[in-house]
Amino acid sequence: DKKDVGVTTFYEEEGTYVVGLIIIHPDYQNKGIASDIINKYIDIAKNENKRIIVKTYKKNPAKKLYERLGFRLYNEDETHVYMCIDFSK
């Protein structure tokens, strides 16, 4: 319906793509919207042979979504996990 149902940030930093933020309105969650968006970001990184990363809270349920889409843990601290897919290799 051409409605705004969320917000996302995606940018390039030092040759790496960063998924900075994805927020989907609760009425539209669990409908595959975030997966579709992230898959488009992954396609961009893949087509350009670049790394794509995401940082999220350890207890964020979205961590499972990132894992399902192919992101793998590469670092963590007390509160966050850092995940990536590396197409630059």
Image: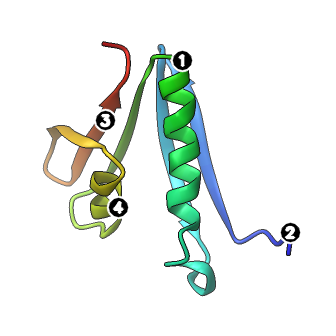
- The residue sitting at 31% across, 35% down in the picture is 84
> Measured along the vertical axis of the image, is residue 41 above or below residue 51?
below
Residue 54 screen position, x and y as percent: 38, 42
> Residue 40: which quarter of the image?
top right
> Measured along the vertical axis of the image, is residue 68 above or below residue 59?
above
- The residue sitting at 36% across, 51% down in the picture is 69
Residue 60 screen position, x and y as percent: 30, 66
21 vs 33, nearest the viewer: 33
Gap between marks 2 and 3, in whole Å? Answer: 31 Å
- Identify which amino acid the numbered label 1 is placed on: Glu
Is the residue under label 4 in contact with that under label 2 (CB below 8 Å)? no
Pointer 4: what residue? 65
Q: Would residue 47 appear left or right of 78 to someone viewing this image?
A: right
Q: Earlier in the sequence, mark 2 or mark 3?
A: 2
- Identify which amino acid the numbered label 2 is placed on: Lys
- Identify which amino acid the numbered label 4 is placed on: Leu
Q: Secondary structure at mark 2?
A: loop
Gap between marks 3 and 1, in whole Å? Answer: 15 Å
Pointer 2: what residue? 2
Residue 5 image label: none
Is the residue under label 1 in contact with that under label 3 (CB below 8 Å)? no
Residue 48 image label: 1
Q: Secondary structure at mark 1?
A: loop
Q: Earlier in the sequence, mark 2 or mark 4?
A: 2
Pointer 3: what residue? 84
- Identify which amino acid the numbered label 3 is placed on: Cys
